[in-house]
Image: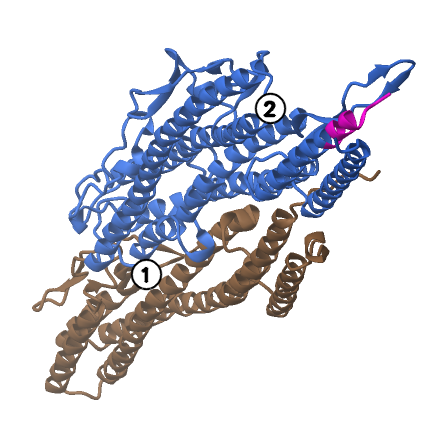
Amino acid sequence: MGTLTSALNVTLGSMLADEGAIAVTSNNIANVNTPGYARQVANLEESPPVPVGNLTIGTGVQLQGVTSLRDSILDLRVNQETQAQGQLNAFLSGGQQIQSLFNETSGVGLQTDITNFFNSFSQLSTSPSDLNLRQAVITAGQNLAGAFNSASNSLTTQQRNTDLSITQSVTQINTLTTQIAAVNQQVTAAQAAGQNAGPFIDQRQQLINQLSNLVDVSEINAGNGSLTLTTTGGSALVVGGQSFALTTQVNPNGLHDIYSQGSDITSSTTGGQLAGQFQIRDQEIPTIQNSLDALAGTLASSVNTQSIAGFDLNGAKGTNFFAPPPAGNVGAASSLKVATTDPTKIAASGDGAAGDNTNANALAALQNQPIINGQTPISAYSGLVFQIGNDVQNAQSNQQAGSQVLQQLQNLQGGVSGVDINEEAANLVRFQNAYSASAQAATVINTLLQTTIDIIPNS
Amino acid sequence: MSIRLNPNILPDLLTAIQTSKQNLDTATTQLSSGLSVNQLSDNPSAAAALVLNHNQSSQDDQFVQNLGTLQSKFQVADSTLSDVVTALTRAISIGTEGANGTLNATDQQDVAQEVQGIQQQIAGLANTTYQGTYIFSGTDVTTQPFTVDPTIGAATYNGNNNANPVQLFNGTFVNSGVPGNQLFQNASGSVFGSLQALYTSLQSGNVNNIASAVNQVQNALSQVGVQRVFYGNALNQMSSSENFLSQDKINLSTQENTLVAVNPAVAATNFSQSQLAYEGELQATSQVLNLPTLLDFLK
């Protein structure tokens, strides 16, 4: 049979357990707005009963431990979706800058200069010996060359800026992996000591989520609470308490490639901001540059060929209108330049007569001839405009859809791990009441003990 | 037990506000720009089609400008030929007088002198320039088309037989003039040749020869009339091209509107709806954020 003293111990244990539970609840309330915090629950457990004769007497309650509530699968899904969002956001940021260079709806772009250039030959055809009209052709040619130069140089500048952002992303990645490795050790140590590793896991999850925004990450549970992080291509980022920094090296194009332990992982990056930045720097911008080069180079070559076929104002054989584009048109857009500043050199005549306009007509007609891969110059440019707009539009659609998925996942994650003030308030009252009841029970037991003590006669 | 919902509703609320704000911004941009496509990604196909539309529209503008240049030049040419006709008519008139045998030798010499004057006047007209170039020397516009020997009255054509085709609209060309030799030294009636014959016959006083020369001048006059028709026809053709181009411009403008313009009524409606939604969203959010918790009721 239990004694009053053991009953008093039960109330004491209960008060201690409730104190612990109240502390957990208070901690939850305190962290209601802490990013990455997973709500904790106090694990209350019956204390082992004591057999007394043929009876088994309960010995109260004890605080067995504190558990952080997380769903690791949800955490993983959130990280995966964060990687996709990071990539799309970085691509969109670059894509929107690119499309602003060709925003034909607000009159920005090459259409006006391409059209004006060919129109200047059409105008010259009305009075081929007019020096003013000849000068207008040179000016229109210079404007066209300037527009190509400017578009190409802006793309190159953006490529360089993106390259700079890539090196900054790598620095951020290395900072995060170093932090994650440190927290990994804390998790392992806490678990080995049988302590609640929840706060460290919260911190680690938050860091991995930030890392996921930057690069594609695969998580492997290494046991002991430790996580191994690699890129999806298998390059180690964090193993236990050790982090592996990514490094950069300048490639022959003057841009930075990313290396993991000596291996070039630039092309195998599939997620996060880094992948989006690579897409802009290594795919989108070069593709547009190639199209611009093909357009500028082929246009210049066609105009030159037709110019050479004609005669200038003095009856001399025509010469190149544009400086000949580089071999394979590589860099043709950025280097496009009008070769002559002498208006009499424009080869408007087809037979050497000063007033003949045959060649001016032929030059003007190039505008509507399929000289660029079976397309007219303006159709080829229109195709480029479509491609740029379409790439951004696709990324926008994917980003919007992905952002909804991410939000839903975060809501599900919040459903498991988020702190609910009402719930915590209810728990607070619950534990407060239990504490008060235990204290009241202790008071009663105390009275009983006093009564028992009072039975003993004074000696 | 029901599924535990995310107690932190702030992200959802902020997303809703952000979406409403974006819609409001879009409506504002559309209203202020008058365009439904303000960036390529808003409608890539429309933006690409707009490039072709603007290109065609600019080409049309250039054709209209070409038409204007040609029209001015043709009007000068036509007016010059009108003066030539007047001069030739005068030559026929005085030549006829010389042929009817009523003039004495001195008068015939006077008439011959007048014919020479007419010839020089026509030579001046045949060498008319427009904006610094000769209009009757074919495509050899920097060379004076006719030189006339002041003594014997023989004219030499220094230009060429070519004419420049100028584009009026896609695929349609008109020649920018008639070469001078076709006008003034046509095989079916040469202006200079007939005037020279008239001058020579008047000087010699042979009535029959004078009559024959007058006939030649009449043939030359007819031929100038025939060639002059080109200018009339070309001006008509240009006028109809101008109509075509102006219709094409209207069509292109309509197409541009269809592609990228925003319907003002729709834009205004979108704006009011977005504004209402945005304000509603803000109000709802402020109310939700101010909802009491259980803590407020615990005493």
Q: Residue at x 38, y 60 (%)?
A: B62
Quarter of the image holding residue A362?
Answer: top left
Q: Colour of chain A?
A: blue
Q: Which residue is mark 1?
A: B178
Q: Position of residue A124 (x, y in %)?
A: 29, 55
Vertical arrangement, residue A55 with respect to residue B139, above or below: above
**Which structural element holds mark 2?**
loop
Badge 2 amino acid: Asn
**B181 left or right of A175?**
left
Magenta stretch bounds: A1-11
Residue B20 position within the rendered picture, expressed as x and y whole percent measured from the top left:
61, 57
Indicate the chain coloured brown by its letter. Answer: B
Identify the image quadrant of the C terminus of chain B: bottom right
Determine the residue positioned at 25% across, 57% down: A133
Label 1's element?
loop
In this picture, is B89 found above or below A233?
A: below
Q: Which residue, given by chain and number where applicable, does mark 2 sit on?
A: A196
- Image coordinates of residue A221 in percent, x first then y, are 59, 15
**Residue B175 in which image quadrant:** bottom left
Q: Position of residue A433 (x, y in %)?
A: 75, 43
The residue at 35%/53% (across/down) is A116
Specify whether A195 is left or right of B294: left
Q: Nearer the viewer, residue A331 or B166?
A: A331
How much space separates mark 1 and mark 2, taking CA atoms? Answer: 102 Å
What kind of residue is marked 1?
Answer: Val
Q: Observer-nearest residue: A392 or A341?
A: A392
